[in-house]
Each structure stands twice: as structure tokens, then as C-alpha cells.
Image (cartoon, rainbow, N blue to C red):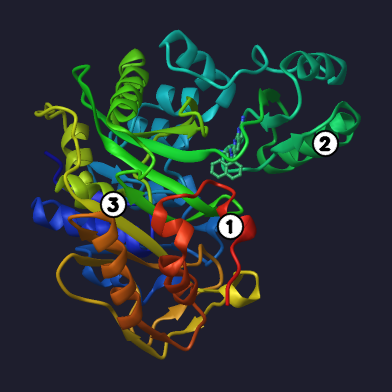
């Protein structure tokens, strides 16, 4: 087992990882930018190293700065959390060269799943259903036009280096192709320095349903049930839940088996998420694989009653997985509370939190790094807390969430709490009748 883990992250996830390390008797090292000097992850860690000024490029995204902290503290493991360097194959490789274990999959797995065309080819080989589309990368605009006509409009152009919506364009008719092609490629080049593009049939109003998987170092892979993440805005998830109100028992079984096949086919090691799009006819298609712990992991923890960070650290230490895939018995919902103004296009609202009272009670969990007097810095992601509720049924869970949202007080900055309160009262949401287009028509009162 690890003796000392360096947590290469900040905010709530740094604190989340630190807590599990403490419970496992593992020493912790926090790293922080000068904007995070007063953060709880810094205060609670056994050691803390300042890694630079507020901009991420010069701190949380700087491999040399983090490796220097590893060297100074002699950490034998590095937990990358989510975002920042969590899916960076070069970082994982450098960790290996320094003799510290990157808590996550191998550099090869990170590269393979980071390139979306390669990931898709891998899934085809594993007999996981994928969205009909081009055979790999598109050579040029003429080839793209031909492929698009063959597949049939609408199609979607995607960047192989992309993910999360960047470099993605829907094309509804042949006349639009050229314009969207140029725009998507330019965006991909600017964002990723790689303008490789591929084409897929555009699935109208899909649901986003993802399966949590975990693989050990001995070839065992299991899934830990699904999460429905269809309530999103501009590719930012707002609410996640488990189980999905859309899945039937037989569909859950088929998708779970496909997710396990995806992991097994590449000998996947660590915690991962297999994302699917599900259309209204219950067809499901592989979309992407995330090779990290995710923001929404608590909903899974609540329905299966396991600490996923602990499981992740255990498999990284070479401990064998015990147990089989899970069928959840409870319902859980997570609301992401962001320092944003929902009445003003979700504009970021950093600043001082003048008062803070967290919801409490049975089945209520709050994952947060903030407190009264904390200043939300403008340099990072605007998520400041996750409110997670758990109950026997979806209906009870929504009722509990409404109560918990009413109880939550955050003053001094704007937050997304008012949005969540209204969502919990929304009839379509309550019926489980929603898809990824939900936020296009949702109106805040
Ligand atoms: C799609 C799609 C429809 N058809 N691919 C969005 C982010 C990136 N991971 C892929 N995305 C989509 N890919 C095909 N072939 C619709 C989306 C999409 C979406 C997916 C999941 C959750 C929210 C979304 C919002 C808009 C579009």
C-alpha cells in the first residue's frame, strides 16, 4: 500500500481524496497555487507545497512544478483527481519515470481513449455498439461531403482530440457542410493543436448515460452501475442521478455488459467511465471513455455504498478486486452548486462567501471545500459544492433534494441553487422525461 500520496488537484476533489487517504492511513501532500493558500485541502494535508501563481498553466497544469513537489516530499503515489492533468498521458509517463505511481490507467490507455477515433476503433473491435459514421479520420472536405451524404444528414463533425463539445458541429444539410467543416477544424486546431476530424450520424435528443467501471491489475473488470447525466448546459453537467429513470432491467444489463467488454478488451486498469448516448428507441452507442474519477462519482457511491476513491487507490496498489457488478438498490441525485448566476446566463460569480450554511440530515451529503469567509477565486472552475441526496425511491429523493436545497444558504455570491430548486419542481424532470436537449427549453422563473 502507498505510504504517501500527493494530490495533484484543488477544491472539493482534493479534499475528497485527502479524506479517503486519511482513513486508509496514507500520508497526504497537498499542492496549491497562491490563490488557494487558505484552502481546506492545504490545511488538512500532512504536507503542502506551493506550486506557483494562480493561472493553472503555471501551477496545477505544470508537470515540472508538480514533479518537483513529488521529489521534495518523496510521495510514492500521485492522485490526479479530475480535470487538470488527470488524463494527461505525458504526466502519467513522467510519474512512472520518477518512480511514483500515477493513480489511474497506463499512459497507453490514456492515449488510446484520449484520441476519439482510436477509442472508437477499439470499441468496434470489442463489439461495443458505436454511432454509425466515417471510417476513421476524414482526409479532406470532398471526402467529408461524400461520407456525410452516404450516412445521411443530419451528421455531426467531431474532433478526434476533442471531447466535451469542443470542435463539434452539427450539419443538417449538404449546403452547410463547408462552413461547419472550416469552423470545427479551426476550433479543434486552436483548442487541441490537432484538427483531425471524424463524422457521425447525429442522434436527435439522446440521453447521456454512463457506466462506472473498475479494472484491477489482473484483468478483472466490473461495472458499478450507471449514472444519467442528461441535464447539461453547454456540455457542463448540472445534475446527475443513479439509477437512470430511463433504463429497463434488460437495457441496463446489456449496457453494463458492453461497458465491461470495453474495459476488458484493453485490459483496463483503474476507475473509468464508459459514456453512451441512448436514443428514444433504446438503442445505445459508445460515445467516449473517461479515464479518471469523475465529478459525479458520489451518486454511484451512494447507491452502491462503496468509497470509489478507496477502490481506485486499492487497485492502483495492486490489490485484487473482489465482488461482481452491482445492481443499485437506492436512488441518488447530485446537484452541482456553482458560483454562477442562473438569472444571467450562468455567468461566473466569484468573490467572498459572506455566509454559508450547508444542508444536513438523513440521506444528505455535501462535498465542498468552501466555508463562510472563503473567497471563490476567478481562475478556476466555478463549482463550489455538490449536494447529493439518497433515498429509497426517485420520488423520495427529489423530495429530499428540494428540502435540502431550501435549507442551503450561501450569501455574498450568486449560485445555481435557485435553478436546482425549480428543476426539482419541473414536471418533465419529475417524470424522468428528459434528454440532453432539456436545458434548451427550460425557463427559469
Ligand atoms: C453526439 C450527439 C448526437 N449524435 N454525437 C456532446 C459532447 C460530446 N461528448 C459528444 N456530444 C454529443 N455527441 C452524435 N453522433 C449529441 C451530443 C451532445 C450531448 C451529448 C451528451 C450530453 C449532452 C449533449 C449536448 C449536446 C450534444
Label 2, secondary structure: give it.
Answer: helix
Label 3, secondary structure: give it.
Answer: helix
Earlier in the chain: of badge 2 and badge 3, it is 2
Residue drawn 36% across the image and 77% down it: 38
Q: CA distance from mark 2 to mark 1?
A: 23 Å
Q: Report whether the residue tagged 3 is closer than 8 Å to ligand 1.
A: no
CB under 8 Å between discs 3 and 1: no
Q: Report whether the residue tagged 1 is closer than 8 Å to ligand 1.
A: no
Residue 299 is tagged as 3
Earlier in the chain: of badge 2 and badge 1, it is 2
Which residue reaches farthest right?
A: 175
- Residue 244 lies, with reference to residue 377, above or below; the image says above
Q: Whole-percent x and y of residue 239?
A: 42, 57
Along the horizontal axis of the image, is 163 left or right of 103? right
Q: Nearer the viewer, residue 356 or 419?
A: 419
Along the horizontal axis of the image, is 4 left or right of 402? left
Residue drawn 61% across the image and 18% down it: 132
- Residue 189 lies, with reference to residue 435, above or below; the image says above
Residue 439 is tagged as 1
Q: Nearer the viewer, residue 438 or 116?
A: 438
- Residue 51 lies, with reference to residue 425, above or below; the image says above
* Location of ligand 1 given as a quarter of the image: top right
Q: CA distance from mark 2 to mark 3?
A: 37 Å
Q: Whole-percent x and y of residue 291?
A: 39, 35
User: Where is mark 2, residue-wise?
Assistant: 180
Residue drawn 39% across the image and 74% down it: 37
Residue 110 is tagged as none
Along the horizontal axis of the image, is 36 left or right of 243? right
Q: Is residue 103 visible?
A: no
Label 1 CA crowd tier, 10 Å (few <14, some 14–19, many 20+): some
Earlier in the chain: of badge 3 and badge 1, it is 3
Amino acid at each position: 500500500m502507498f505510504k504517501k500520496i500527493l494530490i495533484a488537484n484543488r477544491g472539493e476533489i482534493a479534499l475528497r481524496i485527502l479524506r479517503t487517504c486519511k482513513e486508509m492511513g496514507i500520508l497526504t501532500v497537498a499542492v496549491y497555487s497562491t490563490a488557494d493558500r487558505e484552502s481546506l485541502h492545504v490545511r488538512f494535508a500532512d504536507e503542502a507545497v506551493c506550486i506557483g501563481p494562480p493561472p493553472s498553466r503555471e501551477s496545477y497544469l505544470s508537470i515540472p512544478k508538480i514533479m518537483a513537489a513529488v521529489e521534495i516530499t518523496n510521495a510514492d503515489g500521485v492522485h490526479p483527481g479530475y480535470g487538470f492533468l488527470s488524463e494527461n498521458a505525458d504526466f502519467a509517463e513522467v510519474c512512472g519515470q520518477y518512480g511514483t505511481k500515477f493513480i489511474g490507467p497506463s499512459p497507453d490507455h490514456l492515449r488510446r481513449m484520449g484520441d476519439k477515433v482510436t477509442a472508437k476503433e477499439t470499441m468496434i473491435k470489442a463489439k461495443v455498439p458505436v454511432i454509425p459514421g466515417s471510417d476513421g479520420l476524414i482526409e479532406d472536405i470532398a471526402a467529408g461531403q461524400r461520407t456525410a451524404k452516404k450516412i445521411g444528414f443530419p451528421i455531426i463533425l467531431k474532433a478526434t482530440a476533442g471531447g466535451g463539445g469542443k470542435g463539434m458541429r452539427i450539419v443538417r444539410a449538404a449546403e452547410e457542410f463547408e462552413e461547419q467543416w472550416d469552423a470545427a477544424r479551426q476550433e479543434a486546431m486552436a483548442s487541441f493543436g490537432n484538427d483531425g476530424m471524424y463524422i457521425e450520424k447525429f442522434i436527435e435528443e439522446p440521453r447521456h448515460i454512463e457506466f462506472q467501471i473498475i479494472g484491477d491489475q489482473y484483468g478483472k473488470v466490473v461495472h458499478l452501475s450507471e449514472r444519467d447525466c442528461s441535464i447539461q448546459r453547454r456540455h457542463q453537467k448540472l445534475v446527475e442521478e443513479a439509477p437512470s429513470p430511463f433504463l429497463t432491467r434488460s437495457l441496463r444489463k446489456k449496457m453494463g455488459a458492453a461497458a465491461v467488454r470495453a474495459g476488458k478488451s484493453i485490459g483496463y486498469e483503474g476507475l473509468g467511465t464508459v459514456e453512451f448516448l441512448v436514443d428514444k428507441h433504446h438503442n445505445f452507442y459508445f460515445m467516449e471513455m473517461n479515464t479518471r474519477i469523475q465529478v459525479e462519482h458520489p451518486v454511484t457511491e451512494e447507491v452502491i455504498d462503496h468509497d470509489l476513491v478507496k477502490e481506485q487507490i486499492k487497485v492502483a496498489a495492486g490489490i485484487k478486486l473482489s465482488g461482481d457488478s452491482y445492481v443499485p438498490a437506492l436512488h441518488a441525485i447530485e446537484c452541482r452548486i456553482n458560483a454562477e448566476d442562473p438569472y444571467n446566463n450562468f455567468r461566473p460569480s466569484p468573490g467572498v462567501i459572506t455566509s454559508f450554511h450547508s444542508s444536513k440530515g438523513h440521506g444528505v451529503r455535501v462535498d465542498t471545500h468552501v466555508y463562510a469567509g472563503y473567497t471563490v477565486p476567478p481562475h478556476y472552475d466555478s463549482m463550489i459544492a455538490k449536494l447529493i441526496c439518497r433515498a429509497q425511491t426517485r420520488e423520495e429523493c427529489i423530495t429530499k433534494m428540494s428540502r435540502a436545497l431550501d435549507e442551503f444558504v450561501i450569501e455574498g455570491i450568486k449560485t445555481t441553487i435557485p435553478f436546482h430548486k425549480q428543476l426539482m419542481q419541473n414536471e418533465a424532470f419529475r417524470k424522468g422525461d428528459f434528454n440532453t436537449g432539456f436545458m434548451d427549453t427550460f425557463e427559469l422563473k
